[in-house]
Amino acid sequence: SGRFSENLREDVRGLLSLYEASQLASCEGETVLEEATAFSSEHLRARISRMDQRMSRQVQHALQVPLHRRVRR
């Protein structure tokens, strides 16, 4: 149906990967990537309090600083 699988919301690593990949959208109007960002960030934020400390820090960092801004040139 063109939607993201609700089963994915339980896979924190999968959500984090989806979120980071969706941040690579090169221009406005890339609807699928914008939907991926919204879906993954919503579910990551909802689960952050139930993650172990290491994963929680990793997710918080990813949500605060997009992947392409963390990579050194």
Image: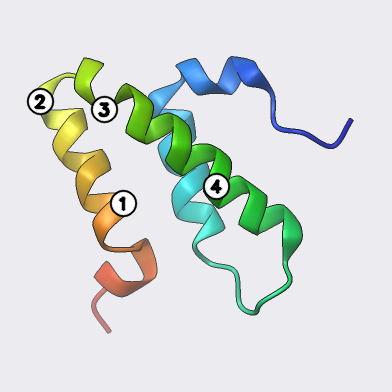
Q: Earlier in the sequence, mark 3 or mark 4?
A: 4
Q: Earlier in the sequence, mark 1 or mark 2?
A: 2
Which residue is pictured at 35% across the width and 63% down the height? 66
Whether residues under marks 1 and 2 lie with C-beta atoms below 8 angstroms apart, the answer is no
Q: Earlier in the sequence, mark 1 or mark 3?
A: 3
> How far is the residue under mark 1 from the one under mark 3?
11 Å
Residue under label 1: 63
Q: Quadrant of residue 46?
A: top left
> How far is the residue under mark 1 from the one under mark 2?
15 Å
The image position of residue 15, as x and y in percent, is 47, 34
Q: Is residue 71 left or right of residue 43?
A: left
- Helix, strand or loop for disc 2: helix
* Amino acid type at mark 1: Leu
- Circle 2 Cα neighbour tier, 10 Å, few/some/many (<14 / 14–19 / ≥20): few
Residue under label 2: 53
> How far is the residue under mark 4 from the one under mark 2?
23 Å
Residue under label 3: 48
Q: Earlier in the sequence, mark 2 or mark 3?
A: 3
- Helix, strand or loop for disc 4: helix
Whether residues under marks 2 and 3 lie with C-beta atoms below 8 angstroms apart, the answer is no
Q: Quadrant of residue 73?
A: bottom left
Residue under label 4: 38
Q: Earlier in the sequence, mark 4 or mark 1?
A: 4
